[in-house]
Image: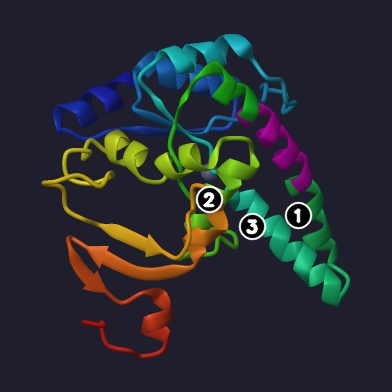
Amino acid sequence: MTAIVDEAHNRGRSVLAHCRCTDAINYALDAGVDAILHCSFYDNDGSYRFDQKTADRLAASEAWLNPTMNMGRANRIRLSKIMEERPLTPFEQDRLERSTVSGENSMDQFSRLVKAGVKLVGGSDCGWSHYPFGDFQGEILALHAAGVSPLEAIYAGTRSPAAALGIKDTIGTLEPGKEADLLVVNGDPSRDLERLRDVAAVFKGGVRVLTAKERLDGGLVPG
Ligand SMILES: [Zn+2]
């Protein structure tokens, strides 16, 4: 792992480690990774046991935490909706039960990690299961539901990932000289994060592009 991190850093790349147990978090920190995904506190026998020493170590390090709070949550919401229309299949029922337990564990570890003072960054873990593409807002909302303030949750989706990717000089905040990638919404998301889903306009590098809704309507970019 040290060789992986050294070689990546030699090439100006950052390394994210996928950690589903406490040993993995410590090995990743030993190797000097730049970010940790999930950061689950399972022991080698599969039981959940939060480890404060590891949490403090992560908080004291330069590594970012990407807790992926929406993946399980979105899936549980999806299964609950199905349940309103028909009984779940045994497979779905099993998924829901396992996801409910792991969701409780991840809420517990998330609140303790935030309390320990980790550097938080939002991320989807998408590409498998039933992750709703095009709704990164769901991750921001999930971070808030898990205990951080609306503004902290917004930072985890904007300036923090820009910093984690080493590109904060060009994107991540609204400042003169930056690229002006903007999501313009109706209302004040710092008071109500759900406003992030009420998109008024999207700018990429200062140029207005179609919103998802405008694309569906087959529209042209409004002047
Ligand atoms: Zn994963």
Q: Earlier in the sequence, mark 3 or mark 2?
A: 3
> What residue sits right under mark 2 in the picture?
139
Examine the rendering and report whether any part of residue 17 can be seen. yes
Q: Residue at x 78, y 63 (%)?
A: 80
Q: Amino acid at mark 1?
A: Arg
Q: Earlier in the sequence, mark 1 or mark 2?
A: 1
Cβ atoms at labels 1 and 3 below 8 Å apart: no
Question: What are the residue bounds of the magenta stretch?
Answer: 100-110
Occupied quadrant, residue 221: bottom left
Whether residue 154 appears in magenta in the rendering, the answer is: no
Secondary structure found at label 3: helix
Question: In the rendering, which numbered label is found on residue 185?
Answer: none
Occupied quadrant, residue 10: top left
Vertical placement of 36 versus 52: above or below? Answer: below
Q: Earlier in the sequence, mark 1 or mark 3?
A: 3
Residue projecting furthest to the bottom: 218
Front of the two marks 1 and 2: 2
